[in-house]
Image (cartoon, grey):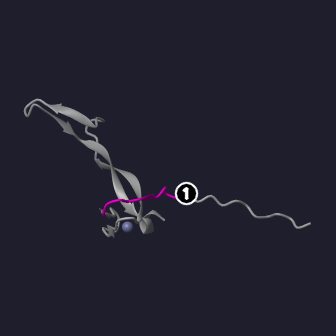
Amino acid sequence: MTKQTTKPIYLKIMKLKRTRKERTCHECKKTILKNESYGQRSITLGSKKDGMTESFDRDKEAFVIHQMRIKVDICKECAA
Ligand SMILES: [Zn+2]
């Protein structure tokens, strides 16, 4: 009987979807063509101010967003 020494290898792979429209990769700026696979990653824009992601500007009478998370498209090469 042969001894089983193979351990399972877990690779974290971004779940890829197929796009129905053209997208631009956030990483390499290449165009992701129609029907090609792509992934999505959420990135953080800006930085918190006084620990707040948003605040109210009394002078402008408007909410100011200091930090927000957006989803960006990633091509399959950059997702790998
Ligand atoms: Zn890319």
Q: Residue at x 86, y 65 (%)?
A: 3
Between 52 and 5, the residue placed more toward the observer is 5
Give the percent coordinates (x, y) of residue 50.
27, 35
Tell me which secondary structure the magenta stretch mostly adopts.
loop
The single residue placed furthest to the left in the displayed view is 59
10 left or right, relative to 50? right
- Residue 7 image-quadrant placement: bottom right
Q: Could you tell me how many numbered marks the image carries?
A: 1
Q: Quadrant of the N terminus?
A: bottom right
Where 53 falls versus 31 (above or below)? Answer: above
Q: Residue at x 24, y 41 (%)?
A: 66
**Secondary-structure class at tag 1:** loop
Give the percent coordinates (x, y) of residue 30.
32, 70
At label 1, the amino acid type is Lys
46 left or right, relative to 75? left
Residue, disc 1:
12
Between 16 and 74, the residue placed more toward the observer is 16
Q: Which residues are magenta?
A: 12-22
Give the percent coordinates (x, y) of residue 80.
48, 65
Q: Residues within 10 Å of mark 1 (few under 14, many from 20)?
A: few
Q: Residue at x 28, y 37 (%)?
A: 53
